[in-house]
Image: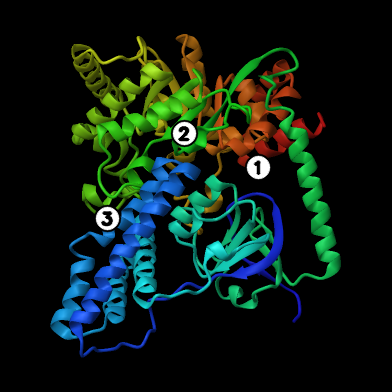
């Protein structure tokens, strides 16, 4: 067969290659339906299948805890919750008892029915839960049929995994020493599968569509996680080209790794703190070795999204304590629950909204349902006894919200002191600056908060009035927009004027092109994906702070994003 190139969505950087391992688990749809003359036998078959599923999941959860930590295991615990849910398993039993369907048909009908309802919802999070329903349905079906088809455990050599989709429970089983990467027919950057793959460090190209049909078991496949391209049965010269590229990437990673132990300091001694963004305690492990000097953003919503029910104080405490201990006294900024809008929790039963990004979310939700915030603050304060934790409130738009949140913090701290609970003597409180009103009012906030962290992802969206998920207008989404740069400057200036520190946890912080500008503006703490740390440290170390200040002054006079990018590119090119 001839070589071909298929295109999807790259969710990681770098090139990987190997022979294709086509993984095709049992499908729920399209199976012939069958009645039974022995409903009691089918009912017993279904119930035994459920018990075997529960045993299988319990073992898999323990493996996942060891690999990825408690939160990721929580995704699989959700499958146990589904199996025990009165709207999932009992209706299958009723199809057998009342209508005489076989166990196989009962499983397929109910799982597909529930998944179909979720898929029709106008919400990305709920649509992704449909995949979880299908996952547990397929697991149950395999037990009903005693299916012994190809399993992920059958992978014994280096492969590129090929599948229509990979469920969360599939992904956590992947052996990263063998699975070089994977390619799927469907999927996007916000799915649990993508998040888990990134945690494992496995390259992935998702959403290749019908192109997946071009790949056969045993084909040689090259995938480029940066461009989203997959080369199927490439010619020898193409393989040789990518082998050279992989060698080059490996050498570059090794060279950049030398910056891990070095401080982020300019040639004239200006020092900044380089931190990492994380979503789970497992991601904190090894951060210090990678060169992170802090955790600048711990997204606690993943703990909630990975749980079938509201995580209690003790579960939260254990997660925050783990991160605090992993960082060995280095700062850890914990963002309070940032849920709502596009990130739903089924057990919260949040209302549907016309404009979710402008609606009932983050601090607005937590100030309305204060028990959520109080429980989380108790957990964080208790965990503060084990490290250097700081608390950050998201989506603050005005001083009233900040003062109310701080008052609740003070009440919770007083209660814990009365209980004799150990905690840090001082826990810094700050706000995430992601709404233009907060950036404009930064000088007023700086009199009261301990720190700022600029969330450029939302700050750009709200400043330029553009939905970054809408491909028709996404070209307008640019953190080099002059208005965004001036808001960032205002926040940093306010922090400096009042003796506070200003950080940044949006994607701009990890962009080496932005580094000279952020240095010139005086940003104190930069928090980014761990994979960007070495590149940013290298860029900072090659710059003079004096030159960067002059550059920032010039950039502030420019009027378009294109002009600003041009000036920054020229600045870096002149120093290479």
Q: Is residue 350 visible?
A: no
Is residue 5 toward the left or the right of residue 245 in the image? left
Seen at 73% across and 37% down, the residue is 569
Instruction: Tell me, for residue 562, which label it has, or none.
Output: 1
Nearer to me, 489 or 322: 322
Nearer to me, 206 or 177: 177
User: Badge 3 is on which residue?
Assistant: 81
Nearer-N-terminus badge (3/2): 3
User: Badge 2 is on which residue?
Assistant: 455
Seen at 24% across and 69% down, the residue is 47
Task: Note whether 189 is above or below 446 in the view shown.
Answer: below
Q: Residues within 10 Å of mark 2 (few under 14, many from 20)?
A: many
| C-alpha span from label 3 to label 2 | 34 Å
The percent position of residue 139, horizontal first and vertical second, equals 38, 67
Between tags 2 and 1, which lies in front?
A: 2
What sort of colour scheme is used for the picture?
A: rainbow
The percent position of residue 137, horizontal first and vertical second, equals 34, 69
Q: Secondary structure at mark 2?
A: loop
- Are the two marked residues, 1 and 3, in contact with CB atoms closer than 8 angstroms? no
Seen at 34% across and 46% down, the residue is 305
Q: Quadrant of the N terminus?
A: bottom right
| C-alpha span from label 2 to label 1 | 22 Å
Nearer-N-terminus badge (1/3): 3
Between tags 3 and 2, which lies in front?
A: 3
Q: Secondary structure at mark 3?
A: helix
């Amino acid at each position: 067969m001839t070589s071909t190139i298929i295109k999807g969505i790259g969710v990681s950087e770098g090139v990987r290659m190997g022979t294709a391992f086509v993984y095709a688990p049992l499908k729920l749809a399209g199976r012939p339906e069958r009645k039974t003359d022995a409903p009691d036998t089918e009912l017993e078959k279904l119930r035994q299948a459920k018990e075997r599923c529960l045993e299988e999941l319990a073992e898999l959860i323990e493996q996942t805890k060891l690999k990825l930590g408690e939160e990721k295991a929580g995704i699989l615990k959700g499958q146990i919750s589904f199996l025990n849910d009165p709207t999932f398993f009992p209706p299958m039993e009723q199809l057998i008892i009342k209508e005489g369907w076989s166990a196989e048909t009962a499983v397929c009908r109910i799982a597909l029915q529930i998944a179909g309802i979720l898929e029709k919802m106008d919400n990305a999070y709920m649509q992704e839960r449909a995949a979880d329903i299908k996952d547990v349905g397929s697991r149950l079906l395999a037990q009903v049929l005693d299916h012994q088809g190809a399993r992920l455990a059958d992978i014994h050599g280096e492969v590129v995994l090929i599948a229509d989709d990979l469920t969360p429970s599939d992904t956590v089983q992947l052996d990263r020493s063998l699975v070089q990467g994977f390619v799927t027919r469907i999927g996007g950057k916000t799915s649990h599968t993508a998040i888990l793959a990134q945690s494992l460090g496995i390259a992935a190209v998702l959403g290749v569509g019908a192109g997946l049909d071009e790949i056969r078991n045993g084909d040689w496949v090259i995938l480029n996680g940066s461009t989203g391209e997959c080369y199927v049965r490439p010619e020898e010269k193409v393989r040789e080209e990518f082998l050279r590229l992989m060698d080059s990437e490996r050498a570059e990673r090794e060279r950049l790794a030398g910056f891990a132990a070095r401080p982020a300091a300019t040639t004239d001694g200006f020092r900044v703190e380089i931190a990492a963004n994380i979503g789970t305690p497992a991601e904190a492990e090894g951060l210090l070795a990678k060169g992170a000097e802090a955790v600048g953003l711990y997204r606690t919503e993943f703990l909630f999204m990975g749980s079938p029910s509201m995580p209690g104080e003790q579960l939260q405490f254990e997660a925050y304590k783990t991160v605090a201990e992993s960082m060995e006294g280095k700062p850890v900024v914990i963002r309070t629950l940032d849920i709502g809008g596009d990130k739903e929790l089924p057990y919260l039963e949040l209302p549907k909204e016309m404009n979710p990004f402008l609606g009932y979310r983050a601090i607005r939700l937590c100030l309305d349902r204060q028990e959520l915030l109080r429980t989380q603050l108790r957990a964080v304060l208790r965990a503060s006894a084990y490290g250097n934790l700081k608390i950050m409130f998201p989506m603050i738009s005005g001083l009233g919200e900040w003062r109310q949140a701080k008052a609740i913090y003070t009440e919770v701290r007083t209660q814990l002191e009365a209980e004799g609970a150990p905690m840090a003597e001082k826990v810094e409180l700050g706000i995430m600056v992601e709404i233009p009103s907060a950036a404009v009012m930064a000088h007023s906030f700086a009199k009261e908060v301990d720190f700022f962290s600029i969330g450029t992802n939302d700050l750009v969206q709200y400043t330029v009035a553009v939905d970054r998920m809408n491909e028709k207008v996404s070209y307008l989404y640019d953190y080099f927009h002059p208005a965004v740069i001036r808001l960032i400057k205002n926040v940093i200036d306010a922090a400096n004027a009042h003796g506070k520190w200003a950080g940044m946890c949006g994607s701009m912080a990890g962009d080496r092109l932005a580094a000279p500008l952020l240095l010139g503006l005086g940003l104190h703490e930069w928090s980014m994906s761990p994979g960007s740390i070495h590149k940013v440290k290298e860029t900072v170390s090659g710059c003079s702070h004096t030159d960067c200040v002059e550059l920032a002054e010039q950039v502030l006079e420019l009027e378009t994003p294109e002009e600003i990018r041009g000036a920054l590119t020229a600045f870096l090119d002149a120093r290479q």
